[in-house]
Image (cartoon, rainbow, N blue to C red):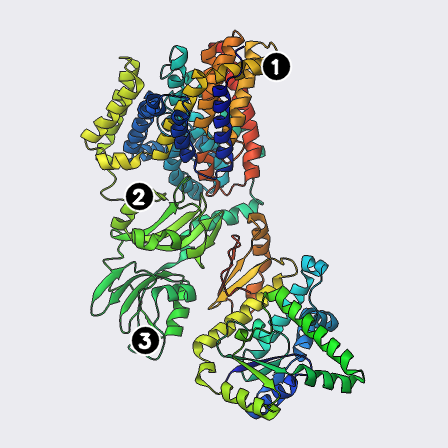
Amino acid sequence: MCIITISRGSYSSGKEVAEKVAACLHYDCVSRDILLEASDRYEVDEIKLVKAIHDAPSILERRGRKKETYIAYIRSALVSRVRSDNVVYHGLAGHLLLRGIPHVVKVRIIADIDRRSAMEAQREGITLEKARSAIIADDEQRRKWTQSLYGVDPWDSSLYDLVVKVDRLSIADAVDIVCDAAKREAFKTTPASQQKMEDLVTACAVKAALIEEFPEVMVLSEYGNVIIHSASGGRHAQKIRKAVGALETTIGGINSIEVHADGNAPPGSV
Amino acid sequence: MKPLTLEMIMVMSIIGIAVFLFIVEWVRVDVVAILVMVGLPLLGLVTPKEAFIGLSSNAVVSIIAVIIIGAGLDRTGVVNRMVTPLLRIAGNSASRIIIAICLAVAVISSFMQNVGAAALFLPAVQRVSRTLKIPISRLLMPIGFSAILGGTVTLVGSSPLILLNDLLVPFNLKPFGLFDVTPIGLALVGSGIAIFIILGRFILPRGESESGETASLAKSEDISQMIGETFELHTPADFTLYRDPVMVGDLRRRYLVNVVSLVAPPDFKILNPEPDVEIRSDVDIALCGKEKDVRRMAEAEGMLLKDHVEVFKEELAEHSSGTVEAVVPPRSPIVGKTINEYDIHRRFGATPLAIYREGDIYRSDIGDMALRVGDALLLHGSWKRLQGLQKDRTLLLTTPIDGELMRPEKAILATAWLAASLVMILVFKIQLSVCLMAGAIGMIVTKVLSIDEAYQSVDWRTIFLLGGLIPLGIATEKTGTAAWIAHAVLGAIGTVSPIVLLAVIGVLATVFTLVISNVGATVLLVPLVVNMAIAANGDPRMAALVVGLATSNSFILPTHQVNALYMGPGHYRSVDFMKAGTVVSAMFLVVMIAMIYLFY
């Protein structure tokens, strides 16, 4: 009983590993369908969400914070989807979107660049050189995306519980390793870790509800006690208070909700 | 006009640096004053004796004595005794209540520090607001402004006026008597109150709307409802089995309940346990919280919620412990710090329940909120421990604590010693500092307050601010800097009539007091304006008096200590002070100049 996130580059066989792990453990396997859920829930074009989660924000986007809004929607959809465990999520930044949850096994599947280039060249019918350039460009784009939004490098192995290189280890080996890890005591869902998950679901839902109007807010939920931190002063905080009035009834799991206009969002806020 | 000398340039540089530091507040104002105090003799601008003469000056000793007398009046409940009959006379009319309390605060403020008088009235005003359903914002600003204006009624009402006579000594000018300023002060207080009665509805904040105002009132009224009641629970026998230890702080974070007592096995009762105390199996705990949160916790943690408080009946009885509201006063060491950083729980043995800020109650994660002036902390503790908090003065308790600290039986003695001081000043014409210190020591000898309480009541920041800036005044005068600037300014503005000169000085002092402390403004401006008045053939005493009074003309920004204190509880914004303060400041200048012109 846990959640597995599989981070992968293109042509790293990560998708295949994820699907086989899900089949082996009888878990659900989710990826892009999260975008569909977010698109339905928040009435945003799916293509905008795809761009938001793939392309690094441009200078203009960084100012406008539109991309952060879409990512808040995606995150809210993802955490709602995986809250009941037994899920393998493969896609960008799953390990970051679910950080702080102890029963998440964070896996990164990597592969040799030559192997990846050969697969790209074969599939697209292009030269090996062009395929290599395309893969490097794609990796770079994802690196920039993660760095601009989370300040970390996706190639930093300390972000993951497992980094498996599919090369000398086959896909089946990788599946076995991941399945074995998922059964370990360390990743078992406990009442405390499930509570953290529930709080993350609540915080993400509140953040998604507010982010369009108040892009700077940070939200923390602890046992359903929600604190919205805003760096803007008193007047602005009053506006947020008015806006959150309805949330207690529309979003489940909220026990109390407070707006703190001091901007000192503690670690763990979303 | 004398030529500009190196010494003058040095003095002007020190003034410039001091004013700059007063504005930017990189270091506290009293530290700036001490830097000036040691910097001047090091640069040879004053003698070592002159550098420290401020500390033994008439002004500084008078202020120490006034603070002690004020503490004596406070400790014996003289102020509270004044308020009750006043309110009875005022009835239910908002205007009459404003007039009654404003007059009372002005009278008190004329004999003690303005912020002290304002603080004494805060709980009474909050009570009146709740009982009579008058918006607090309608009451506090007029009362706060009256406390400031009341400081101009006597020569001991505010620090600048106490300081004035000392600053006149180098010029051999006749000192002012205790009540020489009273006609002007009374006119200012009267005009201030009249402005709020006549124009109050235009210049005071109306609140968001009629319903918004009611909602805000309901909030202040329901503070106790917001933090809930006291409940007693029993933890199950297997509470600590197969789980991480549960601490007092964990229950607070999870369920917003505050454990105020618990039993540590076998039967040791801990009152107001700190957040890191573990909750054990099969023990009783008492906590303060909303019923829905307590029930949620009892269900989730498998605790038994009792119908009544049983085990902690004695400890939680009204005569043993309770909840108080403690306001963060200006210049408190706690300003800018969090409850956790200041370690309020451990330091005072009181449990912080909530923070009340600008009309909102905060219950979640209050330990990490940086505290601001005017924030009200709701604290639970035993009366004995809360008395320690009251003594400490880091926080201002707006809920009176019954117990040993209050000595109502000494009220007559306290009033008698105040009267004795006044008689000595008025009838026997003895020096101000001697009379006031006699009153202060009289209170100590007759046990109105102990010598330790007297020492603790003195605000040493004010003392060093005064003591440190007095030598700057001496240096300004001695080096001829004041005369030089005065001539330069007069040369620039040309020949003006004395009344215009006084008006210019009034505006100048008002501007100075808004950006630097009133004491700093007085010390810097008095030597300057005395020289200006002499050069322009005006009355130098009146020029100095205008400075002493106009440095209390601090209403436009919430920089004055009284305004800062009332800003939070009154739910005011800076713009509210600008609106009402501009009108009152203009009135202040007009009335002051008119009174000086007519009577002096």
Residue name at image x 33 percent, y 33 percent = B79
- Answer with left or right where residue A37 lies relative to residue A187: right
The chain to which mark 2 is attached is: B
Give the image quarter of residue B42.
top left
The chain to which mark 1 is attached is: B
Give the image quarter of residue B127.
top left
- Name the front one of labels 3 and 1: 1
Q: Are marks 3 and 1 on the same chain?
A: yes
Q: Position of residue B441 (x, y in %)?
A: 22, 27
- Answer with left or right where residue A211 lies relative to residue B284: right
Question: Any mark on residue B9, and which?
Answer: none
Q: Position of residue B431 (x, y in %)?
A: 29, 16
Q: Position of residue B581 (x, y in %)?
A: 54, 31
CB under 8 Å between discs 1 and 2: no
Of callouts 3 and 2, the N-terminal one: 3
The answer to whether A209 is drawn above or below residue B59 in the figure is below
Of callouts 3 and 1, the N-terminal one: 3
The chain to which mark 3 is attached is: B
The answer to whether A15 is drawn above or below residue B533 in the figure is below
Which three-letter amino acid code belongs to the residue tagged 2? Answer: Asp
Find numbered disc 2 in the image and state the secondary structure of the residue it sits on: helix
Of callouts 1 and 2, the N-terminal one: 2
Where is mark 3, residue-wise?
A: B239
Which three-letter amino acid code belongs to the residue tagged 3? Answer: Phe
Residue name at image x 40 percent, y 50 percent = B377
- Quarter that holds the C terminus of chain A: bottom right
CB under 8 Å between discs 3 and 2: no
Which three-letter amino acid code belongs to the residue tagged 1? Answer: Ile
Where is mark 1, residue-wise?
A: B493
Question: Any mark on residue B392, and which?
Answer: 2
Residue name at image x 58 percent, y 62 percent = A246
